[in-house]
Structure formats: structure tokens, C-alpha cells
Amino acid sequence: MATALRRSREPMALDDPQRTGYGDSTEDEEPQDMDESKGPLEESGCTISEDGEEEEEVDDMVLEDMERFEASFKNITQRYRLINRIGEGTFSTVYKAEDLLYEHYKNDWDIDAMEEEANGKTNGKPKPRYVAIKKIYVTSSPLRILNELDLLHDLRNSPNVCPLITSFRYQDQVIAVLPFFQHKDFRDYYRDMSIPEMRTYFHSLFTALQSVHYAGIIHRDIKPTNFLYSPARQRGVLVDFGLAEREFTDASQCACEFKPAERQKRIDNSVYASTFAAAQANGQQPRPAYPANDQRSSRRANRAGTRGFRAPEVLLKCTRQSCLIDIWSCGVILLTFLSKRFPFFHSADDIDAFIELCTIFGKKRMKETALLHGQVLQTNIPTIGDSGHTWEKVLLWCTGRNKKDGVVLSKEELEAVEFMKCCLELDPAKRITADEALQHPFLAAANGTEYSDGSYE
């Protein structure tokens, strides 16, 4: 019926005399628009209270859903007892379950159990152990499913990255079994988090990204609901690698790779430049236009991610995207903390998302960013200024403070803003890396002591 790929466990098949009859998948390739992860306000669940182990109340509809799942996936009840549905997204549903065969295996993935043993909290009596079962929808491409499991396998033993315990397949249904991590809903704490707590949060997040990026993997969907954080334990884990990919997969040449002189030469010889020059020669303002018989091939690039967290190069369809798109998403999360607004960006599509960035950064910088990737920005929206706004002004406005009244950001807030600027750098070549972020004074202070020379240890 199903084969199991279990880290630190021997392969095991559930009872099924006909298991050899389910060797091939019959899924169709998923549609192109499936690269859009659910928005931060559309996702359900994904959060567990940090309260005790009391019995959870389960909605009747969730009970019916779990019963259908148990009926469709043969013999799953011999291994796991489903307790609740804790997450539902575009590509999968996640359930909390008790691992009924926990004691039969070596569970070196269970950090909590190892901590309990180290602290002498075990009393010899078996304790219920919980896992998260991710049911991947049958509409997902087999290649996408294999890719996610393969990446999770490569990231085993990575700090602050949720490891893959095992996976099963029954007919066309695939499930991944992951550790269950007790955490708190982002919406319950983001408004109240202090700057020192933000340092700890992002030190944990960038520690995870450091391992992911070192392996040459782009997560592509960094957002609060994919970083399960426990304020009480000051620990978080990065989850959901459903959209992740290896760096430079299907990459092709982009203008952002050229040296400045070469890029400027190409811009000067472009259709855009000739149209602009012709208009100026006639004393006219250049009008938005495109060649009637454009012979250039269409530009295709991976746009996977969540609205509001996509980097500018993703919006501009850069064909040479790197791990640095994850850093931009981290910057947006920090912006959410500092502004106390979630979601901060709330666009309907990529065009709206780009206009939102233009409103903050200004037309001048966004035009330069567009040209960096071989694109042209033309807009007549009167509310978009040339110079944009400073982050200090944006944050004061978001938090109901007025600079005219003599109110300014605190020293700690200014330190956070400086770090955020490094993450929200429009040019990916100038954006901070995960390694550099962990050495930045803002995060170095989370795990070290500050000395008189400004250094940390």
C-alpha cells in the first residue's frame, strides 16, 4: 500500500497484500497558476496554542474531514490517531496526530524528548508523542511532491528547519510526517513584540535560512505562517518547502548580471531608448508604447510565493533569481513588526504589488530597479512621487506618531530600521545575505554581549 522513507527509522510498509499494484501516479501536471501561495489572511489554522495538553475541541466539519482522510488512506489509523486539523493552504492540509508507534523507532528528530531526558523529566511512563501529518493534495505535480521531499531530506539536521520524519504514498495520495511544534499565532503577538524579542525571532529565522541557503536552496515562501515561533521558548522552525527549489533552477541570462557599462550600452540601444529619444526630438513627452511587431521572445520566470512578500526581482520576472529573494521576505516580516500592521502589503496582483513599492521607494529608484532587470517602468499615477518616503516617516505614520510633534523613533527602533534596510535593498546584489545578517549588530546582540568597541561575542 505504501512505502516509507523514515529518517532514523527502518523502511516499513503498512499492511496491504496488493501493495505492488500502486507503483505509478496518475496525476496530471498542475496548472501554471498554482504558484500562488495563499495570502496571509486567507490561510486557516497553522497555529497551535501554547497552553497545556488539555483535550482539544474539534469542529464537526473538521471531524468529517479527518474521517474522510482516514477512510481514503488505508491503514493510517494503525500508525496515527488524528486529533485536529491545524493548517490548510493552497497545496496541502496539515493535521495534528498522535504517533502510536513512537516507541518502536529511534526518534533523534524529537528535540523536546531529548531535552526532557537531559533534564531528567522522564518518569518511565510512556507519554503521548505528537506529529504533524501533511496531506499533499492530489492536484499537485508528482515532480513537485518529490522535489519537496528531496529538499527536506537534504536539509535534515539543519538547525531551526522542520525535518522530515517519514512519508507514505497510497495510490495517488502522498503524506509527509513532520514533527509537531507547539507555537503561537503570529497575529496574537506581533503588535506586542519588543525590539529585543524581535532580535531573538530573527536570529532564529536567519539561522534556519543560513542552513537552507548554504545548501543552495531557495525557500520562496518566507512569511509568518511558515515560521512557527514560540515566544515562550524563544524558538522557531521553518516549515513548508512546497514551493522551494534549488538555486538557479531553469535560470537564464538577465540584465542584472551585466556589468554597469554593458547594461547601460544595452539600454542605450534598446527600443525604449529610441522611442524616448524620438519623442524628445519632437519636443513631446514619451508615451507608453510597445513595438507593433515585437520579435522578442516572451519572458518567463518563477513567480512562486505569497502576495506581499515577493521581492522586486520576482515581480519583474528576473530570470536569475537567487536565495536573496528570501531575505527580502524577512525584511517584510520585520516591517510588519515595526509598523504593527499585518499584512503590510496587500495587493491583488504583481502590478499592484509593484505600485505599492513605488509609493514607498519613489519612481526614480523603481525605474532604476526595473532597468536593472531589463524592464521599463512608465506610470502616470499622480500620487506616486519621484523620491518616495523614508522608513522613519512610514513607521511613524503607521504607529500614529507625528514627527512634527517632535516624536522620533527610539534608538532601538532605528537599529531595527537599519537592519531592515539591508534586507529591503532593491538591488539583490547589494542585499544582505543570511550569513551577513547573523553578523549584523542588530542580530549579533541577540546571542552575545556588547563591548565598549561596539563588537559582540
Image (cartoon, rainbow, N blue to C red):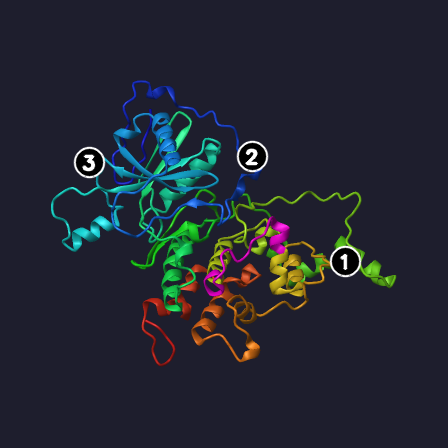
Distance between mark 1 and mark 2 Cα atoms: 37 Å
Q: Nearer the viewer, residue 259 or 236?
A: 236
Q: Give the quarter of the figure containing the C terminus.
A: bottom left
User: How many labels sit on residues?
Assistant: 3
Image position, residue 380 (x, y; %): 74, 59
Locate residue 314 relative to residue 42 in the image: left or right.
right
Q: CA distance from mark 2 to mark 3?
A: 41 Å
Name the foreground residue: 24 vs 315: 315
Residue depicted at 36% across the width and 47% down the height: 155
Q: Secondary structure at mark 1?
A: helix
Q: Residues within 10 Å of mark 3 (few under 14, many from 20)?
A: few
The spot of residue 306 in percent (x, y) is: 52, 48
In reply to whether residue 252 is colored magenta, the answer given is no
Asked if disc 2 and disc 3 are in contact, CB closer than 8 Å, the reply is no
Q: Amino acid at mark 1?
A: Ala
Q: Which mark is residue 273?
A: 1
Q: Residues within 10 Å of mark 1 (few under 14, many from 20)?
A: few
State which mark lies toward you, 1 or 2: 2
- Can residue 209 be seen? no
When the figure is inspected, residue 125 is found, relative to residue 398, above or below; the finding is above
The quadrant in which the N terminus is found is top left
Q: Of all residues shown, which one is farthest toward the right?
A: 282
Residue 340 left/right relative to 449: right
Q: Position of residue 421 (x, y in %)?
A: 51, 66
Residue tagged by mark 3? 104
Magenta-colored span: 336-354
Observer able to see residue 280: yes
